[in-house]
Image (cartoon, helix red, strand yellow):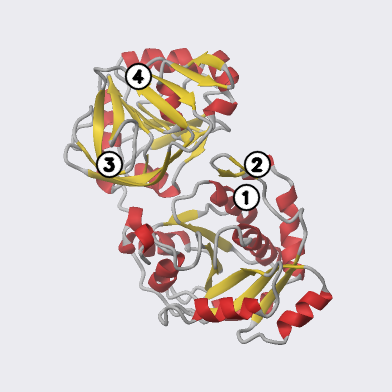
């Protein structure tokens, strides 16, 4: 058994109710008590986990039934909780909002899978007694989801709190005051990243002083034991996989990196903005913000080195921002910047969302042996468009998602494949990428 690790899910009626602020503050307050806090985020988001990781000092993990499957959610949870004393799980959207209007993939779905109680965050601005109707409706909607407490956000005054207290039905474990500084600013692709902000350091003190931490711990301890899952099987082969890691490339699922390591890969992190290309057998370029750092990417030594290595057959997998970087050019803010020039395509920022949602597809070609016919699931979220040449080749055919062009994704050239899909690596996918690097190392 994993043991009855205390765990709690932070849910809400809607997005923008303060889940991330409350969750981050609660994590910080619990850590300040000396607890080892394991953070999680429901859904495919990359940005909220940066705040949780920074706050807890432990890598935040995504829990997403669509991408991982139900067993995958339980297995990731069990592995990540080793050595932790409490798990805090931030939900996504409204508590019961799942894929295509169903419950699947919702915060409630994950709470059921983990048998975890829910602490409901409610935005109380502009309401008093009505908040209890919201709480009652949400708490009673699905009897298999246990809403064990409420935290009211944006309380305007002592009088506002007094009015709400008169009608409460569930235990209230927090009264967070309205404070315009108690929020994480947004931009395209979501909230600002953790390393860009210092204000979040104060969240623990503010949230902690207005929450009943003993009550939160008591509620979290009501979660029953969960069955243990097997550790990822490990191999040894010494393959070196370069992973771009800097402000331009920073979106990675932690499970993807774990699966590469489990298959014997040695991950070599480097910055394409500042570092030369290290000696590696394969390359993984994740998503991020290359458009914000285009000038630095152009002048950095890695750009030409990556292009030369790709021409020589270095296996490369790129996602979203990685796709843009591997194209011939990037147009942004009225300027055109030369990129690596590996893929026969040009990219440009569009000023609006071009793709958002889950991706489901199958590998129909490409240079990675063993992937033909393999299913790939993930997520796309981009404000750019990629215009490939008419004779461009694609490795992925999507049954769900936009991809680069009308359901085609995974643009190919040499041993390089890149698309808008942020893939959640299956064991088969991770093995194929490591195997490609192993074959390259034998040359």
Say whether marks 2 and 4 touch (CB < 8 Å).
no
Name the residue nearer the viewer: 111 or 71. Answer: 111
Name the residue nearer the viewer: 166 or 60. Answer: 166
Instruction: Please give the name of the residue rendered at 57% of the width and 18% of the height, measured from the top-left corner.
Output: 334
Instruction: Please give the name of the residue rendered at 47% of the width and 74% of the height, measured from the top-left corner.
Output: 116
- From the image, which quarter does the N terminus lie in? bottom left
Return the residue at label 4. Answer: 343
* Whether residue 425 can be seen here: no
Return the residue at label 3. Answer: 429
Mark 4 packing: few (<14 Cα in 10 Å), some, or many (20+)? many
Say whether marks 2 and 3 touch (CB < 8 Å).
no
Q: Quadrant of residue 247?
A: top right
Return the residue at label 1. Answer: 54
Residue 110 image point, x, y percent = 42, 67
Relative to 26, 142 lies left or right: left
Disc 2 is placed on an element classified as helix
Disc 3 is placed on an element classified as helix
Q: Quadrant of residue 343?
A: top left
Instruction: Determine which of the numbered discs, if any, sits on residue 6 in the image.
Output: none
Disc 4 is placed on an element classified as loop
Return the residue at label 2. Answer: 195
């Amino acid at each position: 058994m994993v043991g009855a690790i205390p765990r709690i899910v932070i849910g809400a009626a809607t997005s923008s109710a303060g889940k991330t602020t409350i969750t981050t503050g609660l994590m910080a307050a619990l850590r300040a008590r000396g607890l080892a806090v394991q953070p999680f985020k429901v859904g495919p988001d990359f940005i909220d986990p940066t705040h949780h990781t920074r706050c807890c000092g432990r890598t935040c993990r995504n829990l997403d039934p669509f991408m991982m499957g139900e067993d995958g959610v339980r297995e990731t949870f069990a592995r990540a909780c080793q050595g932790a004393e409490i798990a805090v799980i931030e939900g996504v959207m409204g508590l019961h909002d799942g894929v295509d209007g169903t419950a699947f993939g919702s915060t409630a779905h994950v709470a059921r899978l983990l048998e975890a109680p829910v602490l409901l965050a409610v935005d109380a601005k502009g309401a008093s007694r009505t908040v209890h109707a919201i709480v009652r409706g949400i708490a009673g909607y699905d009897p298999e989801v246990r809403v064990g407490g409420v935290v009211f956000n944006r309380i305007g005054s002592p009088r506002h709190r007094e009015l709400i207290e008169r009608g409460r039905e569930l235990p209230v474990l927090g009264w967070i005051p309205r404070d315009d500084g108690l929020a994480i600013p947004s931009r395209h692709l979501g909230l600002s990243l953790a390393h860009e902000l210092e204000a979040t350091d104060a969240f623990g003190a503010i949230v902690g002083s207005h929450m009943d931490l003993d009550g939160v711990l008591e509620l979290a301890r009501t979660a029953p034991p969960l069955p243990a899952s097997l550790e990822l099987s490990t191999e040894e082969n010494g393959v070196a996989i370069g992973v771009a890691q800097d402000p331009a490339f920073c979106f990675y699922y932690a499970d993807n990196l774990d699966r590469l390591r489990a298959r014997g890969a040695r991950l070599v992190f480097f910055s394409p903005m500042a570092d030369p290309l290290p000696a590696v057998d394969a390359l993984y370029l994740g998503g991020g913000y290359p458009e914000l750092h285009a000038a630095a990417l152009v002048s950095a030594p890695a750009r030409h080195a990556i292009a030369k290595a790709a021409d020589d057959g270095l296996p490369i997998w790129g996602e979203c921002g990685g796709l843009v970087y591997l194209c011939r050019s990037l147009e942004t803010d009225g300027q055109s910047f030369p990129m690596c020039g590996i893929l026969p395509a040009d990219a440009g920022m569009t000023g609006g969302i071009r793709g958002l949602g889950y991706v489901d597809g199958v590998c129909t070609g490409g240079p990675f042996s063993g992937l033909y016919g393999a299913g790939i699931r993930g997520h796309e979220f981009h404000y750019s468009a990629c215009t490939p040449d008419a004779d461009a080749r694609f490795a992925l055919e999507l049954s769900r998602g936009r991809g680069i062009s009308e359901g085609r994704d995974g643009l190919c050239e040499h041993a390089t494949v890149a698309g808008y899909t942020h893939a959640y690596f299956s064991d088969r996918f991770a093995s194929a990428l490591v195997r490609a690097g192993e074959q390259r190392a034998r040359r």
